[in-house]
Image (spheres, grey):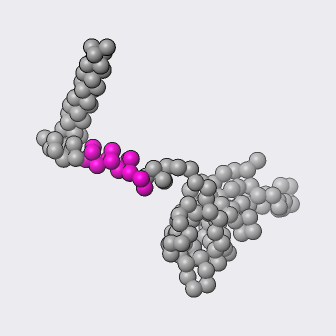
Amino acid sequence: MANKIVRIILIIVLFVVFFELGLFSSYTIVTAEAPNPQALIDMQISKVTEFFSPENVNEALIKDPTPVNITNKKDVGLKMEELSKVDGVNVDSMNITTYDDTDNKNLTVNIEALGYASPNSTSGQIVISQTPSYKVIATGQAEYKENGLRVDENTITITSILQLY
């Protein structure tokens, strides 16, 4: 029994030694400099402790997003339309959520809205469809102002455009 425990410990030690040797050699190859063992070990320890810190454990737990209301839906819709190059964005279908604490002054918000394609021209006649063609998903920074939560249009970035069938 003691012999098995010693073997397991020896395998773990050998694994760690080979891992460290690989880290040092790859560091030398990538940077073309001699590695600083103390700095590399400190970096590994800080990354491992950061990974298991209580803040990161809480972030890793799946939370439901909190819906929020913004005061500048039309401006956000126009900016999303411009950035995503769709023909129009339905502000009535706009869904704004956040994973941040809503008590904070600044929030990162996720914005989802339905987008419309350009009108199709077939046989000389224009066909305008009332059904949305796209789902546009964006992120942006919002801040509480005197009249409510307002998204800064300059911080809006489109994360994906999904075509609906």
Total count of labels:
0
Residue projecting furthest to the left: 34
Q: Quadrant of residue 34?
A: top left
In the image, residue 146 sits, relative to residue 99, either above or below, namely below
Q: In the rendered image, which quarter is residue 95 located in?
A: bottom right
Q: Where is residue 143 in the image (x, y as percent from the top left)?
A: 53, 75
The residue sitting at 42% across, 53% down in the picture is 54
Instruction: Please give the name of the residue rendered at 43% of the width and 55% of the height, measured from the top-left corner.
Output: 55
Residue 155 or residue 49, whichever sits in front = 49
Which of 96/74 is in front? 96
Residue 10 at x, y = what percent?
25, 21
Q: Nearer the viewer, residue 41 or 95?
A: 41
Q: Is residue 58 left or right of residue 49?
A: right
Q: Residue at x 50, y 75 (%)?
A: 105
**Is residue 88 at all visible to an observer of this figure?**
no
Residue 107: x %, y % from top left: 52, 69
Left or right placement of residue 122 versus residue 153 in this view = right
Q: Looking at the rendering, which quadrant does residue 78 occupy?
A: bottom right
**Looking at the image, can residue 46 be seen?**
yes
Judged from this view, the residue extending furthest toward the bottom is 146
Q: Residue at x 22, y 39 (%)?
A: 27
Q: In this view, does 51 lie above or below 69?
A: above
73 vs 163: above or below? below
Magenta stretch, overall SS:
helix
Does the stretch in magenta take in 22? no
Q: Position of residue 1 (x, y in %)?
A: 31, 14
Q: In this view, does 98 lie to the left or right of 92?
A: left
- Residue 44 shown in magenta: yes
Q: What range is drawn magenta here?
A: 43-55
